[in-house]
Image: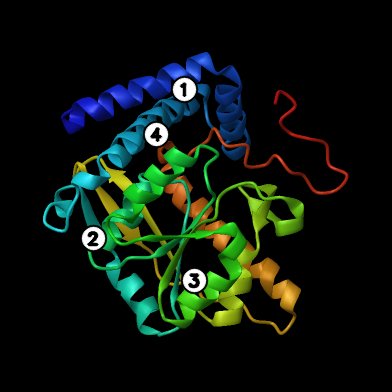
Amino acid sequence: LPRPVARGLAAGTVRLLLLLLPRMRKTAEFNLRLAFPEWSEAQRRAVLKGMARNLGWMAAEFARLPRYTRENIESVVVLDGHENFLEGKSRGKGVIYLTGHIGAWELSSYAHALYGFPLHYMARPLDNAPLDEMVNEYRGRSGNKPIYKNEAARMMLKVLKDAGTVGILADQNTMPGEGVFVDFFGKQACTTTGIARVALHTDAAVVPGYAYWDENLRKYRLRFEPPVELTRTGDAERDVRENTQRFTKVIEEIIRKHPEQWVWIHARWKNRPEGEPPLYEFL
């Protein structure tokens, strides 16, 4: 299918799914009320509509990954602030590509590899083995490689020691044993400590990167922000918490700039600090 047709059909499918799966829609509506209590219902509906379009487009772009090459990628994705990534890379300790489920997250790392900067990405094997094989085959066509959870720590350290790049999605709910509660849109959210622990251990540069749709340009901008400078107080656990909060605030600021391009259907605040009641009573 031509790209506009594929993206349109995929966006329509996501809109239909939101109608057919009320819990998914309720989660998104709840999250938007929590994150933006000052907004009108019309504003939240507009963001939900934009989110459906973004998710559909992202799915269509993923299906088209094999068609993108170094010769044509600039017609779809342009680099923005790439000097920030290069600064982090020039430090020689490796780069942690800090990102989230924003815009075309699958396309962002794929495009960056086509531009000459492949990475290792954190991956959870899908339950469907043939589908998992196909997804990773697509992701790997530009040179990216997976790191699975059972080998995550060892592989991440090896890649960073070799001055490579590791991409990590840092915007999902985390089990309490693997994370800490930090502020996210004014509400405590359990967040992975892995990025902070690895960054503090290796001194790797933590560079935020994300591909968002630029309506004026009619392309995705793969935007890199300046490396996040680490806090080091000498108190290991305090440093982990404070840097995790810092990374989370960066993700929040990106989402605030492009709220219609984040995945609001995820129950980000599902796990609660001890003693707090659940937020998603409808799940």
Q: Secondary structure at mark 2?
A: helix
What amino acid is found at the position of numbered circle 4 in the picture? Leu
Question: Badge 4 is on which residue?
Answer: 55
Q: Nearer the viewer, mark 3 or mark 2?
A: 2
Sequence-first disc among 4 and 3 = 4
Sequence-first disc among 4 and 2 = 4
* Image side of residue 182 versus residue 164, left or right: right
- Spot the residue most to the right: 275
Q: Which mark is residue 42?
A: 1
The local crowd at label 4, few if under 14, some if 14 to 19, many if 20 or more residues have their Cα within 10 Å, is many
Q: CA distance from mark 3 to mark 1?
A: 35 Å
x, y percent for residue 194? 62, 65
Q: Nearer the viewer, mark 4 or mark 2?
A: 2
Residue 82 seen: yes
Q: Secondary structure at mark 3?
A: loop
User: Which residue is drawn at the image coordinates 32% and 75% (left, top)?
Assistant: 86
Question: Badge 2 is on which residue?
Answer: 114
Q: Secondary structure at mark 4?
A: helix
Sequence-first disc among 3 and 2 = 2
What amino acid is found at the position of numbered circle 3 in the picture? Val
Q: CA distance from mark 4 to mark 3?
A: 28 Å
